[in-house]
Amino acid sequence: MRAAILQLNSSDDPSENLSQTQMWVRQAAEGGAKFVFTPEVSNCVSTSRAQQIEVLRRQDDDETLAELCKLARELYISISIGSLAVKTDDPDGRFTNRSFLINPLGEIIAQYDKIHMFDVQISATETYRESAGYRPGEKAVVAETELGKIGMAVCYDMRFPLLANALTQAGAQILLYPSAFSPVTGAAHWHSLLRARAIETGCYVIAAAQTGVHRSSGAKSRSTFGHSLVVSPWGEVLLDAGTGAGVYAFDIEMDNVAKARQKVPSMLNARSFTAP
């Protein structure tokens, strides 16, 4: 199947981001893509809590979600919205980082809330506390699509192989890691982590990414690594989008999943053991 990744440079204005995303989804479909993948927080990249409170919406009122469902139906394609930042009814006011799979009828067939929160101190000047603004999810999700069985994950989730293994044991043939990755950790770990997840599970790995310096309405700007990747079940990098925003098409051959797992059936060979 022909598919496409959108590598975005989203700002903190959801309406502006939606217009760009719609244009590139159409471009991908015109190029023959039947499945389009967008990055993490496709609707809003912001470091400002005040800005997020002003512009984010609950799921039922989110314009990006509604319009991309309509567009999927119009073009008769599937869309993976890597994630949207959406408001919740949590008493502490935290948002959720939620991923969506939309089928060609424009229906949401699966959604997943990011489980692992990016709470790290990269350096003296670069610190992230995702859990301060976002409520972590608790449930792993595998969805049946016309492309194959998809295991849903988001960004920092890629550092936790137990999640990838659980998704694969539940039938996943493709693992999604839409991301807004730090440039520092991206340069050090991005390719290695994504190739490792593909190799150890025999899954395709598809990671649509945010890229560049993200325009902000006044708060401190944020930068992301880019390099959207598609990795084969054998660990080969089939697509590396570099750092340019745009549409990146690729072809996916699902027979390669069975071929890789036949050569090295590591998931079948896994054994339970007593921990030290």
Image (tube, rainbow, N blue to C red):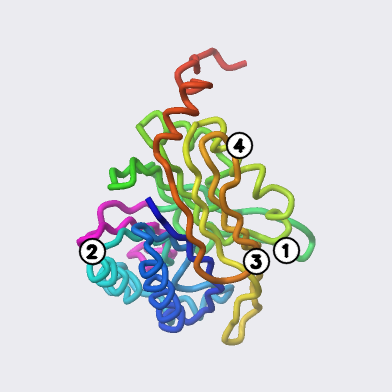
Which type of secondary structure does the marked residue at label 4 adopt? helix
CA–CA distance between discs 4 and 3? 22 Å
Magenta segment, which residues?
Answer: 86-112
Mark 2 vs 3, N-terminal side: 2
Mark 1 vs 3, N-terminal side: 1
Q: Badge 4 local density, few (<14 within 10 Å), some, or many (20+)?
A: some
Which of the two marks, 1 or 3, is nearer to us in this view? 3
Which type of secondary structure does the marked residue at label 3 adopt? loop
Mark 4 vs 1, N-terminal side: 1
Q: Which mark is residue 196?
A: 4
Q: Amino acid at mark 4?
A: Ala
Q: Badge 1 local density, few (<14 within 10 Å), some, or many (20+)?
A: few
Mark 2 vs 1, N-terminal side: 2
Q: Is residue 144 above or below residue 136?
A: above
Q: Is residue 47 above or below residue 183?
A: below
Mark 4 vs 2, N-terminal side: 2
